[in-house]
Amino acid sequence: MPPAKIAWRQISPDPQHAWLTEDLDEGFEAFLPLSSESAEVFECHSLGISTNRDSFVYGFDRKTIARNAEEFLVAYDTAVDRFRRQGRPEDIDKFVENSPLKWSRNLKRHLKAEERVEFATENIRTVFYRPFTRQYLYLSDIAVDEPSHTGDYFPKNDKESGNRLISITDLAGRSAFSTLMTGGPVDLHLCASSDGFQCFPFYTYAGDGTHRRENITDGALDQFRSHYADASITKWDIFSITSTPSSTAPTTASVTPPTSAANSPASRMSARPQTLVIQRRRLLAPKDLCILRAAPTLPTNP
């Protein structure tokens, strides 16, 4: 068809600079972010654990992981000794080019600082490597490239913490949006090897595993209680919502609060449409569990 006969339609971007807006939810920007500089719903969050050397530190057999991790740390310490003996050469890449270890940027930084680490069996943890699949992990600095904070959310000295963690696809995900709740630390690529995952715990702890505190802000609790006119709503009610996934949703999760009752605040909240909102695009039907932004529903008469 000649260009002159095409029925052109002029379009303009919205305030968020999106051009294709036909399937976008205009009310999305009014919802509370799960976490931001002003805290909003969650005070803290973290990426999952990124080892950059899974074959050395992950596995299903505890003895194998202990052996592999110890061999890795011995080889690293040997490299530190050789680095010192050779007069601390400036060209780190050339220095490690024939080493059997996987030299990531962080490991090279540790080498240059001549940092050492000793093997300790208590660093072997169980981690959700993929959905519903736990593996042993030797979780310590140097051995693991980016330990993140997810291990700290489940302290070694508090094995019955009762903590829960919601993991969601990070920004600019290449696979379908995913979310999963776990009762332990998670790998960076929990639900998709091509994407990273952000983690939102219910409890956080001090560095030594003490001083447990709830991660949902008091401000978020006040807003939910005010909106639903229900002072009995708790932070667990906000965190854990029993939902019925819809077939229209690309990926959803159905989770249950630690304690549930037919007429609990969480049950009453989940009965309201769109208690949580996943993203600006209208992909999910009422009662789907959505995790990118959370907010009380906005009906005229709640």
Image (cartoon, grey):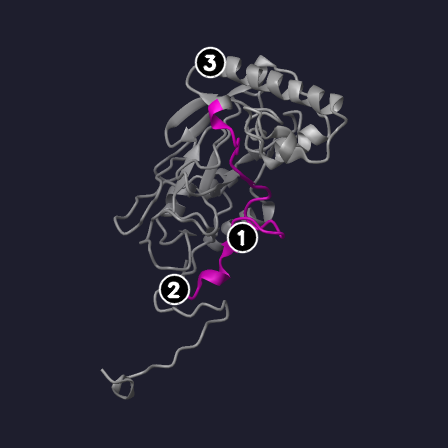
Question: What amino acid is found at the position of numbered circle 3 in the picture?
Answer: Thr
Q: Is residue 288 left or right of residue 49?
A: left
User: Between residues 16 and 253, which one lies in front from this camera angle?
Assistant: 16
Q: Give the range drawn in magenta.
A: 26-55
Tag 1 secondary structure: helix
Q: Position of residue 64 (x, y in %)?
A: 46, 13
- Looking at the rendered structure, which numbered label has been put on residue 64? 3
Note whether 276 is above or below 164 in the view shown.
below
Say whether residue 25 is magenta: no
Query: Is residue 32 visible from the viewing direction of this image?
Result: yes
Mark 2, secondary structure of its residue: loop
Against 131, residue 11 (above or below) is below
Q: Is the magenta stretch mostly helix, strand or loop?
A: loop
Structural distance between the alpha carbons of marks 3 and 1? 50 Å
Label 1 Cα neighbours within 10 Å, binned few <14 / some 14-19 / many ≥20:
some
Left or right: 49, with 38 as reference point: left
Tell me the quarter of the image containing the N terminus: bottom left
On whether residue 53 falls in the magenta region, the answer is yes
The residue labelled by disc 1 is 223
